[in-house]
Image (tube, grey):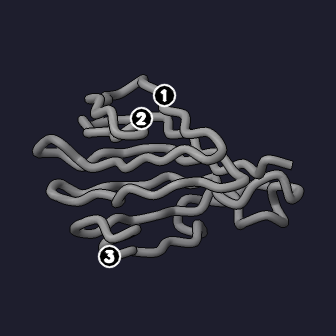
Amino acid sequence: MVRKGEELYQEKKPSPFHGKGEILVRSLLNGPEEMYDKGRVFAHTTIYPDSGLGYHVHENESETYYILSGVGRFNDNGKIRIVKAGDVTFTGYGEGHSLEAAGEEPLEVIALILYKN
């Protein structure tokens, strides 16, 4: 299968997890069915300047971000870290995080959410 960029499901999400601004999520795989029920998200996400995902906790799943471009402010269970292109973040089961764009350019990330079992 080849899915062209213009065929990807896209969704703009305002204030995700009580964050601020707006993000754009482009699904690379369409949910658990295409992930063989091992996860629910594999997406290219754009976080616009002055926007971000609010702090939230993952129960029975983990989330990994691979930073493609831009600069972000990542809250890793209360510890703030600056992330940039090439960095990887991991939020395990029962842990929390948030991510916001910290520069003048959009923050581009690949997001992967995998189930615990």
Q: Secondary structure at mark 3?
A: strand
Indicate which label's residue lies in the foreground, 2 or 1.
Answer: 1
Q: Which mark is residue 88?
A: 1
Label 1 Cα crowd, 10 Å radius (few <14 / some 14-19 / many 20+): some
From this viewpoint, which residue is outermost toward the left?
104
The residue nearer to you, when weighing 72 against 94, is 94
What residue is shown at x 76% (from left), y 51% (from top)? 115
In the rendered view, does 36 fall on the left or right side of 96?
right
Q: Which mark is residue 67?
A: 2
The picture places residue 37, in percent across and down from the top left corner, at 86, 59
Label 2 Cα crowd, 10 Å radius (few <14 / some 14-19 / many 20+): many
Label 3 Cα crowd, 10 Å radius (few <14 / some 14-19 / many 20+): some
Q: Earlier in the sequence, mark 2 or mark 3?
A: 3
Q: Earlier in the sequence, mark 2 or mark 1?
A: 2
Q: Which residue is mark 3?
A: 14
- Above or below: residue 29 compared with residue 98: below
The residue nearer to you, when weighing 41 against 116, is 116
What residue is shown at x 71% (from left), y 66% (from top)? 30
Amino acid carrying label 2: it is: Ile
The picture places residue 86, in percent across and down from the top left corner, at 42, 23
Q: Are marks 2 and 1 in contact (CB under 8 Å)?
A: yes
What residue is shown at x 46% (from left), y 75% (from top)? 11
